[in-house]
Image (cartoon, coloured by chain):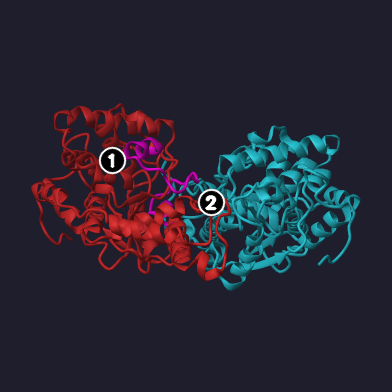
Chain colours: A red, B cyan
Amino acid sequence: MYSEIRPFEEIRTLLAGLPEPCAQSVAEVRRRDALLTKPPGALGRLEDIVEWLAASQARPEPVIERPLVVVFAANHGVVAKGVSAFPSDVTRQMVDNFKSGGAAINQICNAFGAGLKVFELALERPTRDFTQAPAMEEDEVAATIAYGMEAARGADLLIPGEMGIGNTTAAGAIYAALYGGPAARWTGRGTGVDDAGLARKNDAIDAALALHAEYLRDPLEILRRLGGREIAAIMGAILGARLNRIPVILDGYVACAAAALLHAMRPDAIAHCVAGHVSAEGAHAQVLARLGRKPLLDLGMRLGEGSGAAVSLAIVKAALACHRDMATFESAGVSGKSN
Amino acid sequence: MYSEIRPFEEIRTLLAGLPEPCAQSVAEVRRRDALLTKPPGALGRLEDIVEWLAASQARPEPVIERPLVVVFAANHGVVAKGVSAFPSDVTRQMVDNFKSGGAAINQICNAFGAGLKVFELALERPTRDFTQAPAMEEDEVAATIAYGMEAARGADLLIPGEMGIGNTTAAGAIYAALYGGPAARWTGRGTGVDDAGLARKNDAIDAALALHAEYLRDPLEILRRLGGREIAAIMGAILGARLNRIPVILDGYVACAAAALLHAMRPDAIAHCVAGHVSAEGAHAQVLARLGRKPLLDLGMRLGEGSGAAVSLAIVKAALACHRDMATFESAGVSGKSN
């Protein structure tokens, strides 16, 4: 399963040497935008989107020809604490559903011409219950990050998604560790736990925060102790995309835990990422505020799988189509402003 | 240009006999939704969208096979008052741009498989300057509404849009008349007027409110005195869609003036309409609140042409694709909730 081993130090080194957004490509986009047959600024955030694509791809004429959703699936030991409304078996069952084309993300990818790849991360071997011990070992985390880094290969826009019964508990623990507890500030009902289930979820996270308290200043240690393999892989996917100049659309509550960890290590490590949507799960809106990201969509979605971000891909494609294919005032013979 | 004459009384009669949303189709949609491989409610507003389509089409399995954007173009006498940053000639030039495929709306329609039709409403003959006289005659308004009613023919989802230099002034006047002035509460910079232009715009509207004050209790009189042909045609398009069980996505500041007039006559006259986006123009957000509509998108767009609503078509299509094509728990062999 793991293609390569990179200890945490290699990841820190990698973070120190990320390619910068391309200011020259942004300037080219702005130059063309001013010529298009519309009042300046009238396309609002669609105009910003094209600048983000250009900056991230380092192309004055950005392209979206091979957008890709990658879904990482993993299982979580903390499910033993009764934190989810569904059993762990559902992770494997949903992977099969992705593969046979029956999930929401399949339909959204089909609708907008995105590719979909599903990666299983040792489903038969859940992470350890983080109320008892660190969820993972360092070499396992580093190898999973490295694995995720390869996932974007061949894409020109990446949407990392996830599936994992129990993973909103892992994400909630990460947010509480990064931004301060108690758990209840950050958590939601995930796939739909009842009040008792939510209380078990919060108790599990608060217990883990106490158990691991002295190690939670380092985001990579937070990931190792409280996270999950899909979150590590998404972190890798975001990093790999940056290294290969591939813009990223962030999905919701769980996927953003990976972005939040990167952001905590180096705020501009996610400069190539936009927030596809704000999830209805837990305190995702507050997470986005911490990340300085305004979501493209606010539709009350809370499904994971990359689904919210994949819907927002349509907006990104529309933005690029307008910029690329609109006529200019000159070519269309349209008069400019009269005052 | 006008296919038929219908005086205002016929329009009032028509409004009294609109077909109702289909509750049985909504019940069928909910029944199927509960079977799909996702936690209940996890697709958020995507689930509501399918219910709206089913209610409006009166189909338990709604379809979007022929979505259509119709753009009505018209000119406005009040432009003589210096209310716009662009000359009236631009209306015709942009119609040509639509026809040759160079405008933003062309690219968005192409991106999402929507048809586009453009209707010119006597561009060579602007409405009268409403600071001096009613903009239109009753028979002209009624005939334009009737013309608009035919525009949706053959579509299964309709997006009415507009182009008309000066028409944010007409829309602002309608909002001020419906909801209370002064003009400055409702207006924005349109295509980008400077401070002096905005002052002229507000002055023109306030002058018109005073001139026509005693006739502004009737929404159809507001339309006749302060509106424009594209707004009348959009009103007709919304009505025609309702009569033919075609759901409507409302666009922004100008298009919603037509919806607001209908809503003032009968609030549930726009039950088959969702708000595609909230525009950055003027007080569109407050207009949507008055109409009881939460927009699907908030992207700072303010272009008109149906562009914001056309971007939101992607969300509507994704919602329907999920509902129609997702596997059920049973068919996919996915376990249900464990608590």
Most foreground residue, B249 or A135: B249
Q: Position of residue A24 (x, y in %)?
A: 29, 58
Q: Residue at x 48, y 64 (%)?
A: A111
On the question of residue A70 being in view, the answer is no
Q: Is residue A288 magenta?
A: yes
Q: Is residue B68 rendered to the left or right of residue B314? A: right
- Chain containing mark 2: B
Q: Residues within 10 Å of mark 2 (few under 14, many from 20)?
A: many
Mark carried by residue B46:
2
Q: Amino acid at mark 2?
A: Leu
Chain where mark 1 sits: A
Front-lying residue, B204 or A83: B204
Whether residue A326 appears in magenta in the rendering, the answer is no
Q: Position of residue B143 (x, y in %)?
A: 84, 59
Q: Are marks 2 and 1 in contact (CB under 8 Å)?
A: no
Residue A179's quadrant in the figure? top left
Q: In the image, residue A329 lies at what x, y percent?
A: 52, 64
Q: State the extent of the magenta-drawn residues as a range.
A: A284-310
Measured Cα–Cα span from mark 2 to mark 1: 27 Å
Q: Is residue A144 above or below residue B268?
A: below
- In the picture, the disc for residue A170 is 1
